Image: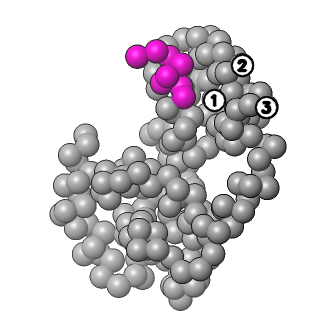
Amino acid sequence: MSLLSQLESLLFVAEKALSPKDIAILLEVKEERVQEAFELLETKYNHDESGIHLFFHDGAIKMGTNPQHGMIVEKVVKAEIKGELTKAQLETLTVIAYKGPITKPELEQIRGVNCAVILRNLHIRGLIEEQKITHGILPAFVLSFAALSHLGITQVSDLPEYETLSAHENITQALEENN
């Protein structure tokens, strides 16, 4: 597997900007190689004909859409977050509520599907928050204070049957299958 291909995949799924140091540790390569690969990817993506662009801030990089397409992207995002939550969004929110803090890969292991768009929509709606976890570079997701307030509770342990459902053997087994 090429380093460029690995970086593209990481940047595509990452919720937050990633630093060359974090990526180098994750991929077990020298930081200089990651920085060189960033420069190649910037040349590949950051031009008018590309719908994808790379954004650099404080030494970290994030993949996003071409800024020239902002109005089109905004229309789609607004359409996605209007109205009722979908069944998939409710399922995802429930898993986060009862098993959070939980990373995107852990959530996808439990649900069996890619959750990137759902997580983005729940985040935009203010229903979930990201938490930095100490054992990895990926953020973990938890219910937001706004979601707790909307549910009329002050902490997730106040959810119905929290003790039973948060430790349910099917969820624990699904998470262990990936390890």
Please indicate, yes or no, whether residue 168 appears anywhere in the rendered image: yes
Give the spatial CA distance, label 1 vs label 3.
25 Å
Which contiguous range is marked in magenta? 1-8
Residue 135 location, quadrant: top left
Mark 2 element type = helix
Residue 100 location, quadrant: bottom left
Does the residue at mark 2 contact the one at mark 3 (Cβ under 8 Å)? no
Label at residue 19: 1
59 vs 135, left or right, is: right
Sequence-first tag of 1 and 3:
1
Front position among marks 1 and 3? 3
Dividing the image into 4 quarters, which one contains the N terminus? top left
Query: Three-letter amino acid code at disc 2?
Result: Thr
Vertical relation: 66 (above or below) 44: below
Mark 3, residue position: 48
Compare residues 162 and 60 and report the one nearer the observer: 60
